[in-house]
Image (cartoon, grey):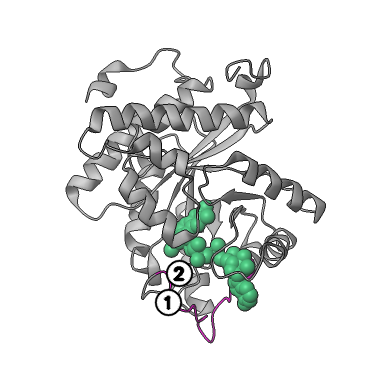
């Protein structure tokens, strides 16, 4: 029944891919292989994350520049408010705009001391994601995405506060929200319904995390408040030292989640790629996304 999805939905499905800026030459080589493998899928955009305290600003900018110079892809620059005054953030926005960036993912960010430390806005800085969206809207006609948390942001007292924050982001000009990763599609669907009731009408794009490494994923999940259902742990149990089966199970799990979302009417998907192409490529294939040249380039698949 999983495969009896709505007829014709494939043609309307769009994907986007998220990368992080590489720290070493080897990571850079790997990222570039990934970008080249995913490029023919013609994603709506590819986004590049921004590190705590602006520590990766240069690396984010360098990665975005390479995407602009060497690919046909549309990059979106993530940007945070951490440890920077308004002037500094505005200067970064200006720098990106001069490079030709027209899309941003606007975030508050986490304290430089790490997730869990109390967030203190810079005294002359933007206080949160909504404030940063306002700054972007004042500086240009940008396409701005923001975060959303179907399972609530860990610092938020309740879901209503979180939805209020999302509403403020929309009022300040956000065009779409991308969710934190989740594994229970009912939770996502309830969140979207609640946002709609609050008058939020922008797309709320599910952020899909293909599980390249189950143990690492559980650490991320604990930090960002994403629930790891016991059935999911059960599927990966015993596979720590069996990468081939782990990969096959990961593809099956993500395909199942994404196909179920397609059945529920979702047409946009954002993939947290972890700079790896295999799972996002396979899952995109499952939902009807094919290389725009018509045939898969198997030579790059083998590289
Ligand atoms: P906001 O939406 O501004 O705030 C999060 C929640 O905290 C709000 O919903 C609200 O309920 C609560 N809150 C905030 N301020 C207040 C207040 N004054 N009073 C009461 N409640 C408040 N991090 C990075 O460092 N770099 C990245 O590139 C990056 N990319 C991301 C991309 C996506 C799609 C997502 C979902 C997250 C990303 N993150 C990134 C992580 C993000 O920075 C953290 O989740 C951070 O803790 C919150 O940032 P935010 O913009 O979502 O915060």
Position of the N terminus by quadrant:
top right
Position of the C terminus by quadrant:
top left
The residues bearing labels 2 and 1 have C-alpha atoms spaced at a distance of 8 Å
Judged from this view, the residue extending furthest toward the bottom is 123
Residue in view at x 63 percent, y 32 percent: 267
Q: Quadrant of ligand 1?
A: bottom right
Disc marking residue 117? 1
Residue in view at x 70 percent, y 61 percent: 163
- Position of residue 214 in the picture relative to residue 133 (left or right): left
- Provide residue 289's location: percent of width, then percent of height: 51, 22
- Provide residue 252's location: percent of width, then percent of height: 43, 26
Region of the chain picked out in magenta, as a range: 115-132
Q: Main secondary structure of the magenta part?
A: loop
Say whether residue 38 is visible. no
Chain-order first, disc 2 or disc 1: 2
Q: Is residue 32 located in the magenta-colored stretch of the structure?
A: no
- Provide residue 64's location: percent of width, then percent of height: 40, 50
Residue 246 drawn above or below residue 7: below
**Where, by quadrant of the figure, is residue 294 drawn?**
top left
Residue 204 drawn above or below residue 246: below
Label 2 C-beta lies within 8 Å of the nearest ligand 1 atom: yes
Give the secondary structure at mark 1: loop
Q: Is residue 120 located in the magenta-colored stretch of the structure?
A: yes
2 and 1 marks in contact (CB < 8 Å) = yes
- Write down the residue under mark 2: 110
Give the secondary structure at mark 2: loop
Residue in view at x 32 percent, y 35 percent: 34
* 116 or 101: nearer the viewer: 116
* Mark 2 or 1: the one toward you: 1
Residue 229 drawn above or below residue 91: above
């Amino acid at each position: 029944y999983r495969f009896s999805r709505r007829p014709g939905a494939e043609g309307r499905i769009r994907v986007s891919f998220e990368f992080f800026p590489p720290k070493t030459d080897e990571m850079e080589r790997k990222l570039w292989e990934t970008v080249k493998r995913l490029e023919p899928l013609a994603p709506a955009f590819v986004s590049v994350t921004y590190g705590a305290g602006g520590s990766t600003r240069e690396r984010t900018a360098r990665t975005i520049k390479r995407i602009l110079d060497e690919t046909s892809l549309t990059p979106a620059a993530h940007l945070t408010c951490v440890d920077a005054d308004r002037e500094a953030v505005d200067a970064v926005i200006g720098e990106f705009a001069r490079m030709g960036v027209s899309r941003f993912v606007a975030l508050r960010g986490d304290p430089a001391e790490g997730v869990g430390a109390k967030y203190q806005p810079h005294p002359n800085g933007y206080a949160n994601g909504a404030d940063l969206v306002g700054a972007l809207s004042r500086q240009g006609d940008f396409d701005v995405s923001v975060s959303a948390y179907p399972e609530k942001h860990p610092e938020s007292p309740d879901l209503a506060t979180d939805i209020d924050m999302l509403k403020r982001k929309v009022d300040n000009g956000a065009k779409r929200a991308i969710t934190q990763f989740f594994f229970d599609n009912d939770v996502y669907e309830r969140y979207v319904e609640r946002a709609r009731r609050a008058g939020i009408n922008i797309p709320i794009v599910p952020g899909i995390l293909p599980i390249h490494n189950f143990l690492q994923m559980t650490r991320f999940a604990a930090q960002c408040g994403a629930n790891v259902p016991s059935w999911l742990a059960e599927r990966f149990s015993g596979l720590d030292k069996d990468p081939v089966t782990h990969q096959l199970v990961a593809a099956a799990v993500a395909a199942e989640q994404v196909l179920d979302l397609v059945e529920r009417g979702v047409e946009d998907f954002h993939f947290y790629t972890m700079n790896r192409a295999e799972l996002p490529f396979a899952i995109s294939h499952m939902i009807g996304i094919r290389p725009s040249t018509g045939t898969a380039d198997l030579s790059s698949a083998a590289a």
